[in-house]
Image (cartoon, rainbow, N blue to C red):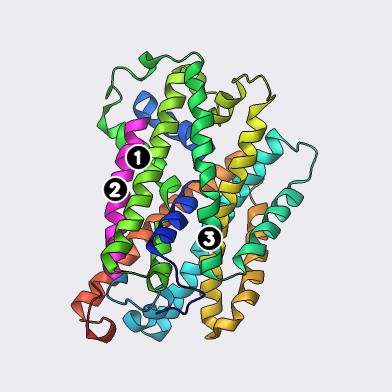
Amino acid sequence: MANGKNSITPGQLMFLVIQTQIGIGVLYLPSEVHDVANGDAWISVLISGLFVQFFVVIIWLLSRRFPSANLYDYLPRLLGKLLGTIFHLAYILFFIIEGSFILARYGNVIEDWLLMETPRWIIIGLMCIVCWYLVQENLRTIARFFVFTSILILLLIVITSFTYSVHVNFLYIFPIGSEGWLNIFKGSNEAMPSLVGYELLLLCYPYTQGRSVEKLKAVSIATAFSSLFYVFLVFTSLVMFSPEQMKLLPQPVLYMVKALSFTLIERPDIYFISIWSLMAATSIMSYMFMAAKGISHLYKRQEKYRKAVVYTVIFFFIIALIPQEEQMIKTFGKISTIVGYVFIFVIPLFLLGISIITHKKEAGRISG
């Protein structure tokens, strides 16, 4: 079990997962799912949320067999030293790629909407510095920051809700199911990348206080909240814009907010982006934490964690600069989605199977 500085409560675990999931998808998810499922996009997101709950259970079943160890600890126990090290490095690379993709998209949004004349490397570099400042601290400090900033998610909901005071047309989503279940499930695949983040359980399980069921409940509630939050955003976008308009808007939520008019606030979209930037930052921080934990485990010494964070930040910065155009970033994202299924579902299921077949579990018991 973790020491006091790294231990967190199930409630803090819940907010860690929520803040990891709610990030870049706030702006891009409605458009990307609509491209496939059109007016049934909100159903696609809802189905994705159900699939995610199944993935969470798989990760939980694996983690509870090693209650005081994280992913990097039990990989060599299940796969042997050589193969375990290969998978260890693969997971580090996966977390770096996932976080770098979020960072790259963040840089594009800020460059397109706010800082058109600012070099992209400066935008990305400043975000890396902000993330490094917090990620170098212990898990409890990171979790407390995530809990504190979670109130901003409610603020995003309130701002978006004001669009219902503008012109909306609920007929845009009818007839429900007209796109067919094949397109709806294809849309679910597009929504899955925005709901990743529950893989934090692979690393945070031993650091979380309480019974095993409480940890599962915390992550399940987090993914349910994130799923419903995205359903709300997608549904609101669909009734705000016509199908023809949705095809032309890469970030429909921003255009919705920009259309709002307040007496005391001009350009509400700028305030929205400011809040969203913090959401993007927490997502990036989570992946930096997971990657840095993996790198520090290679040293076999926990005090090397801060040095590992520095290496991780450098990797994030360099990789995020590689995809420049939006089309390149989309391709990067599609590859990341496929790889994500492997690391978040296939490998944990494979490890769980090995653990059950070989009867390998910690101290001959399973945590309750």
Q: Looking at the image, is mark 2 or mark 1 earlier in the sequence?
A: 2
Mark 2 → mark 3, Cα distance in angstroms: 29 Å
Q: Secondary structure at mark 2?
A: helix
Residue at image coords 45%, 72%:
7
Q: Is residue 162 left or right of residue 271?
A: left
Asked where in the image residue 194 lies, by quadrant, the reply is: top left
Q: Distance between the Cα atoms at labels 3 and 1?
A: 32 Å
Q: Nearer the viewer, mark 3 or mark 1?
A: 3
Q: In the image, what residue type sits under mark 3?
A: Arg
Q: Mostly what secondary structure, the magenta segment?
A: helix
Mark 2 against mark 3, which lies toward the viewer?
Answer: 3
Q: Is residue 199 above or below residue 247?
A: below
- Residue at point 52%, 73% (across, down): 293
Which residue is label 3 attached to? 144
Residue that numbered label 2 is attached to: 51
Q: Magenta region: which residues?
A: 42-62
Distance (Cα) linking label 2 and label 1: 9 Å
